[in-house]
Image (cartoon, helix red, strand yellow):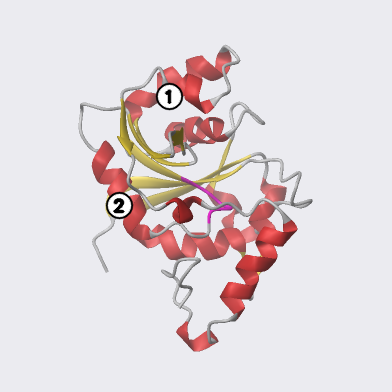
Amino acid sequence: MSEALPATLVVLAGGDSRRMGRPKALLPVGSTTLIEWLIARLAPQFAHVVIAGRGPERLPPRLRPLLAPDLHAGAGPLAGVEAGLAASPHDLVVAVACDMPSVTADLLRRLAHAADDGDVDAAVPRIAGRPEPACAAYGRSAAAPIAAALESGRLRAADALADLRVRWLDREDPALFANLNTPDDYQRFLDEYAAVPSHQRRPDASRRDPA
């Protein structure tokens, strides 16, 4: 396995889950939960892990010590990035939403390397011109502009990102950023997961290739 990055993985788990009808982090995946499954796949790439969210009741008990409470609850993914940067012992964080099961360790490494210099505040994928702030890398220098945007009520990611020096990644596979927004999305994911023999399911698997 590759050496762990000197960075913090920030798992975003502060969403309302209105369309899903229950907290996405707690959705069952085999014998575990979605957020535990995601962390098992991605955390070994990082020196530190935090979970940005609203409260411990939305997390499995064993992950609750990793909680970094959102400082602006309900303010979208950048509120989780703000909380993650505040809790991180490292100057670089890589954020991923807990409902993005297709995200791979290779993608997160690309984001980290793209953001790991003094010329940018963030490295953000952009799919068909639309930014993906919930799967992106942020430097410590992004903390103050993000906090200022949230304080002023500018909650749209595009507005906050406009205040940052961003390195855009425009050639990533759109399928990597698929969210589990509805019960149908979740069932499709479970069907793909269940189609793979249990002895072939590795923690570093992607949604499209859970083996």
Image side of residue 46 versus residue 132, left or right: left
Figure quadrant of the C terminus: bottom left
Which residues, given as a range, are shown in magenta? 96-100
Identify the main secondary structure in magenta.
Answer: loop
Residue to which mark 2 is pinned:
109
Element on which disc 1 rests: helix
- What percent of the width, then of the height, locates residue 30? 63, 75
Relative to the observer, which residue lies in front, 96 or 4? Answer: 96
| Horizontal and vertical percent position of residue 22 | 76, 52
Which residue is pictured at 48% across the width and 34% down the height? 81
Query: In the rendered view, does 210 fall on the left or right side of 105?
Result: right
| Residue depicted at x 40% and y 17% | 163
Amino acid type for the residue under numbered disc 2: Arg
| Residue 153 shown in magenta | no
Specify the quadrant that holds the N terminus.
Answer: bottom left
Q: Give the residue at mark 1.
A: 161
Picture layout, residue 191 above or below residue 5? below
Q: Is residue 98 magenta?
A: yes
User: Is 107 placed above or below 196 here?
Assistant: above
Q: Secondary structure at mark 2?
A: helix
* Labels 2 and 1: the sequence-earlier one: 2
Q: Furthest residue to the right?
A: 21
Do we see residue 91 in this rendering? no
Q: Picture coordinates of residue 180 (x, y %)? A: 63, 54
What is the crowding at mark 2: few (fewer than 14 residues within 10 Å), some, or many (at least 20)?
Answer: some
Q: Residue at x 56, y 62 (%)?
A: 36
The answer to whether any part of residue 161 appears in the image is: yes
Corner quadrant of residue 188: bottom right
Give the residue type that dot 1 points to: Leu
Extreme-front residue of the structure:
128
- The crowd level at tag 1 (other Cα within 10 Å; few <14, some 14-19, many 20+) is many
